[in-house]
């Protein structure tokens, strides 16, 4: 079918212009919805904002697709520095800020912008899912490092060593969530004074989120920590 362009709409007269405006309004609404889906896919804690460590996922996805759909230099200029996106400098990215910067990137793409953003959202969901699996795997492996006597559970003495084991996972001012942890912080099931793998994994994962460190970086740090402990 023939695409309704602005010059064509002008040639069609007043009705053509009105039709063109209605089409453009619908396109913008569809594009806005697609961008919000991308934002939601990256907003891991569903708080309506992207913390800097969550924005890293958007950066990763856009970087992977730059060159295929985006001009690489333009994508780098727009998305490389999170501070360019965080216009009000509140250390988080609002939906409005995210949509504005993504529209700036999409301005150079004449067609299929909605489909591209939908693919970005799908890719972001895949990346986050992969990171969660990798983090879970590393936490389970990390458990064996904490379980010094390899009896399948960690007790108060072993938990007390966590402060030392996690000291390099984040800057000192972010480590409060992991300091001074005790058995009771993990022993949510049997409450028998010991922590098994199924109790340890979700509780540590919950606290690791508070470090505001990108998941892929946490995976790498936990892996390095585990290698050192061998």
Image (tube, rainbow, N blue to C red):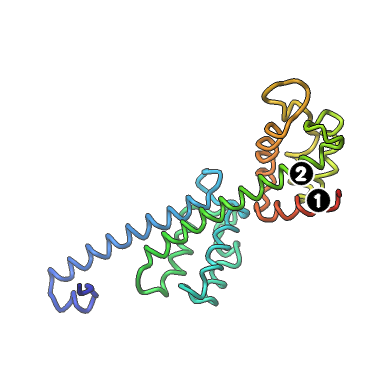
Q: Relative to the observer, which residue lies in front, 228 or 35? A: 228
Task: Look at the numbered disc 2 and give the secondary structure of its residue.
Answer: helix
- Residue 91 visible? The answer is no
- Residue 43 visible? The answer is yes
- Nearer-N-terminus badge (1/2): 2
Question: Which residue is at 59% across, 56% downward?
Answer: 89
Residue highlighted by disc 2: 142
Q: Tell me, yes or no, whether the two marked residues, 1 and 2, touch with CB atoms within 8 Å.
A: yes
Real-space Cα separation, disc 1 to disc 2, in angstroms: 8 Å
Q: Quadrant of residue 84?
A: bottom right
Q: Relative to the observer, which residue lies in front, 24 or 64? A: 64
The answer to whether 24 appears left or right of 115 in the picture is left
**Count of picture labels:** 2
Q: Quadrant of residue 60?
A: bottom right
Residue highlighted by disc 1: 225
Q: Relative to the observer, which residue lies in front, 63 or 176? A: 63
Percent of width and height locating residue 146: 82, 39
Percent of width and height locating residue 219: 70, 52
The answer to whether 159 appears left or right of 200 in the picture is right
């Amino acid at each position: 079918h023939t695409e309704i362009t602005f010059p064509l709409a002008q040639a069609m007269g007043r009705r053509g212009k009105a039709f063109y405006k209605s089409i453009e309004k619908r396109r913008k609404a569809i594009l806005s919805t697609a961008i919000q889906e991308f934002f939601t896919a990256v907003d891991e804690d569903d708080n309506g904002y992207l913390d800097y460590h969550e924005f890293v996922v958007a950066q990763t996805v856009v970087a992977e697709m730059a060159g295929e759909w985006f001009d690489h230099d333009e994508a780098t200029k727009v998305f490389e520095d999170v501070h360019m996106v965080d216009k009000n400098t509140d250390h988080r990215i609002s939906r409005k800020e995210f949509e504005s910067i993504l529209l700036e990137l999409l301005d150079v793409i004449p067609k299929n912008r909605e489909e591209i953003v939908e693919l970005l959202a799908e890719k972001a969901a895949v990346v986050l899912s992969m990171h969660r699996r990798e983090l879970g795997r590393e936490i389970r492996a990390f458990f064996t490092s904490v379980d010094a006597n390899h009896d399948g559970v960690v007790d108060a003495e072993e938990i007390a060593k966590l402060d030392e084991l996690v000291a390099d996972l984040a800057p000192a001012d972010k480590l409060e969530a992991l300091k001074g942890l005790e058995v009771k912080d993990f022993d949510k099931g049997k409450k028998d004074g010991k922590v098994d793998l199924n109790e340890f994994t979700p509780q540590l994962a919950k606290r690791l989120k508070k470090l505001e460190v990108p998941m892929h970086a946490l995976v790498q740090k936990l892996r390095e920590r585990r290698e050192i402990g061998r």
